[in-house]
Amino acid sequence: MAGSLPGKIAKSLRGGSHSIAGRLNDMSGGLRNAETTHRDLQSRLPREFDRDGTAFFDSEFGVHVPRSAPPYSTVPLRREYAGENKRGSWAWGFGRVKYYDETRRQKFMVTVRDGLLYDSRGKLLSTDGNGWSKGNYGLFVMDEQGRIFVTTKAKPGHFHHSTLVAGEPVAAAGTIRVSNGVVEQITDASGHYRPDRAHTLQMIHRLRSLGVPKLDPHDIEFTFGR
């Protein structure tokens, strides 16, 4: 009995070491699989998406969003509108589109307080009653720095999304419906920029980060490609 005890202890230790080694091997294999999965997911991201941790996957819409914070990914003005701000431009065939510089666009910049949108005068923003088109919408653009500009002064051939940023690239553009500061609906309707879903979702998540309540998915309309 006494003579067999050391042998039993040695056997138990050997068995334990094998068990520990097996577990370590399993953990190592799991880490390797996780690294492989991570590299695979990274490789699937569109090339223009950032790889510094700011890109993320919006599971609600099934879309990879390029940036979660400024500076945001942008889309350029479409080629057919190049030079539209010059007199005699062929883009519209009449007049010329106004382009506002940094100073002039400030009056269209909105801010967010307690989840509500305010205009540059500090009043609750509303597009209903004086908005663009039958839906009482305003035009909006978001620039690379996450600043949001809204106007209800759209006029074909004279005042467009491009007006608010002087034809520069935008992080998002479309229409927005706001009533007494409450965001009710957002679309990507901008023929000048035609943003994809990823860029429109930059605007959605920007608003959320500023404290705007989450919109129902049915109140976010996509017109252009994924």
Image: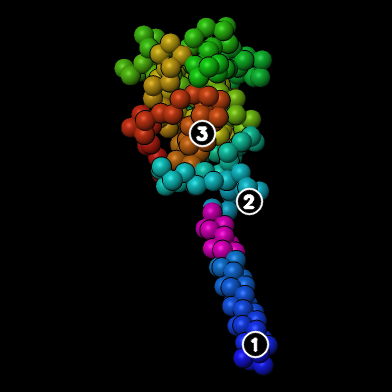
x and y, in percent, of residue 208 in the image: 51, 29
Q: Amino acid at mark 3?
A: His
**Between disc 2 and disc 3, whose residue precedes?**
2
Q: Of the numbered discs in the image, which one, if any, rests on residue 85?
A: none
Few, some or many residues within 10 Å of mark 1 (<14, 14–19, 20+):
few
Q: Earlier in the sequence, mark 1 or mark 3?
A: 1
Question: Where the C terminus falls, by quadrant?
Answer: top left
Amino acid of disc 2? Arg
The residue to which callout 1 is attached is 5
In whole angstroms, how far apart are the C-alphas of marks 1 and 3? Answer: 67 Å
Label 2 element class? loop
Q: At 66% from the left edge and 48% from the top edge, which residue is drawn?
A: 52
Q: Nearer the viewer, mark 1 or mark 2?
A: 1
Which residue does the numbered mark 2 point to in the structure image? 51
Measuring from the top left, give residue 189's x and y in whole percent.
41, 30
Q: Are the two marked residues, 2 and 3, in contact with CB atoms closer than 8 angstroms?
A: no
Considering the whole magenta stretch, tell me its main secondary structure. Answer: helix
Dot 1 or dot 2, earlier in sequence = 1
The residues bearing labels 1 and 2 have C-alpha atoms spaced at a distance of: 59 Å
Q: CA distance from mark 2 to mark 3?
A: 18 Å
Looking at the rendered structure, the kind of residue marked 1 is Leu
Please tell me whether residue 44 belongs to the stretch shown in magenta. yes
Q: CB of mark 1 within 8 Å of CB of mark 3? A: no
Q: Residues within 10 Å of mark 2 (few under 14, many from 20)?
A: some
Q: Is residue 87 visible in this depiction of the protein? A: no
- Residue ID at (57%, 60%): 38
Segment tinted magenta in the rendering: 34-45
